[in-house]
Image (cartoon, rainbow, N blue to C red):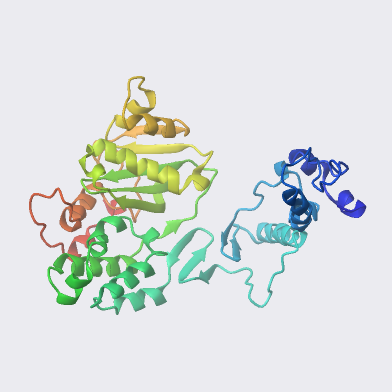
């Protein structure tokens, strides 16, 4: 490292990385601070690698200064940010451009948009408050026909990878499509549930609820839902007195988990939220509306065993405010916003679509009309 480069590196960064640029190490070793290595090939490579690393070539702020300073969301190589006033928008934009210039990141002005009420991005419409699917994609999905090959089904499911966060019970409805085999699709044998699931998913994409942008200054609300075959959850926040959805998540249960008690499956749903959205909710208060008391018991019990032990360890890391509700009508109906499906209706969808090995009777067919049940906000 040259004298000029040494002067450009913050001393706080060097202290944080336990590096001393003035220490050349023992003879024959080019690694700063190295006290000797058995393999001479490794120390000869380290100086070259170190000189190629950005941290040794730029005046990088100390780690304590690198916390997020802008309320912005990053989408691959695009950055979107919004404020309630024009003056605040200009101030945030100035700070953003300063940060980009500091890191030598170029911005394409012809591709940039400023002062917009909403912006399109990858088949989504993003505004300062919400994100929704764009009408262009909605119309395209409506014209799709049921695929005649397994590859076509997989392609359809793959196209939903970016949209399934708008579908509350996606793992429940799509389960019958994931279980299809190539012979079954080509022969058209026993495809009634799969066809209905396909139509329901198309309908749900068209009528996807609006997702609010997360606000880390407010508590997050977790509403888990578990049935015999799946564990889902809604991550939301309160806006104008109503809980609005921020993210959806869920998955179909594994074979071993099918034997769990419904209360244990609810724990799986809560743990999935904590895992999937960890970077989003870390450090924020969390309110959990649960239909069972096992969550509180797991967190406080000194006699728990089996799977409850690792669950308790994971849950103990979070600041959870557990609130038990036996039914959705017990206190939740008045505060649930549009886009959150009643738990009982999710049970009905699961009953009709999930093909589990433990089922005692074949399922009947669900109709698209079931999806036209009024949302909680209209009760």
The residue lying toward the viewer, choosing from 32 and 341, is 32
Please give the name of the residue rendered at 77% of the width and 43% of the height, measured from the top-left corner: 13
Q: Can see residue 149?
A: yes
Q: In the shown orientation, is residue 52 left or right of residue 365?
A: right
The residue lying toward the viewer, choosing from 288 and 170, is 170
Q: Quadrant of residue 270?
A: top left
Please give the name of the residue rendered at 69% of the width and 70% of the height, measured from the top-left corner: 107
Residue 70, x across and y down, in percent: 64, 53
The residue lying toward the viewer, choosing from 21 and 213, is 21
Residue 174 lies, with reference to residue 303, above or below; the image says: below
Please give the name of the residue rendered at 43% of the width and 71% of the height, measured from the top-left corner: 134
Q: Farthest residue toward the top?
A: 302
Q: Quadrant of residue 91?
A: bottom right
Residue 147, x across and y down, in percent: 25, 76
Q: Farthest residue toward the left?
A: 361
Q: In the shown orientation, is residue 265 left or right of residue 222?
A: left
Q: Can see residue 333?
A: no
Please give the name of the residue rendered at 35% of the width and 22% of the height, measured from the top-left corner: 301
Residue 131, x across and y down, in percent: 46, 62
Q: Farthest residue toward the right?
A: 3
The residue lying toward the viewer, choosing from 204 and 232, is 232
Q: In the shown orientation, is residue 183 left or right of residue 95?
A: left
Residue 354 lies, with reference to residue 110, above or below; the image says: above
Q: Total marks drawn?
A: 0
Residue 34, x across and y down, in percent: 78, 41
């Amino acid at each position: 490292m040259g004298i000029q480069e040494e002067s450009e590196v913050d001393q706080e960064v060097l202290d944080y990385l336990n590096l001393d640029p003035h220490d050349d190490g023992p003879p024959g070793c080019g690694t700063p601070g190295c006290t000797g290595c058995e393999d001479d090939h490794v120390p000869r490579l380290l100086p070259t690698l170190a000189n190629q690393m950005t941290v040794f070539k730029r005046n990088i702020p100390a780690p304590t200064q690198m916390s997020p300073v802008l309320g912005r969301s990053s989408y691959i190589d695009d950055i979107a940010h919004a404020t309630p006033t024009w003056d605040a928008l200009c101030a945030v934009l100035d700070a953003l451009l300063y940060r980009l210039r500091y890191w030598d990141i170029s911005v394409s002005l012809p591709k940039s948009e400023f002062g917009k009420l909403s912006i399109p991005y990858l088949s989504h419409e993003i505004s300062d408050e919400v994100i929704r699917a764009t009408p262009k994609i909605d119309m395209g999905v409506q014209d799709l026909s049921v695929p005649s090959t397994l590859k076509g089904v997989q392609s359809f499911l793959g196209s939903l990878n970016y949209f399934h966060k708008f579908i509350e019970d996606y793992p429940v409805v799509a389960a019958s499509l994931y279980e299809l085999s190539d012979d079954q699709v080509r022969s058209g044998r026993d495809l009634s549930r799969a066809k209905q699931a396909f139509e329901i998913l198309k309908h749900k994409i068209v009528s996807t609820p609006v997702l609010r942008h997360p606000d880390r200054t407010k508590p997050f609300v977790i509403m888990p839902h578990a049935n015999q075959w799946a564990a889902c959850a809604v991550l939301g926040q309160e806006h104008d007195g109503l809980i609005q959805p921020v993210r959806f998540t869920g998955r179909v249960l594994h074979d071993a988990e099918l034997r769990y008690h419904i209360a244990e499956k609810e724990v799986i749903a809560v743990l999935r939220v904590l895992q999937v959205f960890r970077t989003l909710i870390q450090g924020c208060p969390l309110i959990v509306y649960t239909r069972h008391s096992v969550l509180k018991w797991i967190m406080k019990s000194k006699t728990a065993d089996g799977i409850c032990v690792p669950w308790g360890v994971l849950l103990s890391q979070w600041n959870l405010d557990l609130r038990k509700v036996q039914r959705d009508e017990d206190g939740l109906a008045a505060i649930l916003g549009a886009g959150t499906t009643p738990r009982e209706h999710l049970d009905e969808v699961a009953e009709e679509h999930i093909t589990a090995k433990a089922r005692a009777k074949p399922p009947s067919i669900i109709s698209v009309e079931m999806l036209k049940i009024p949302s909680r906000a209209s009760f």
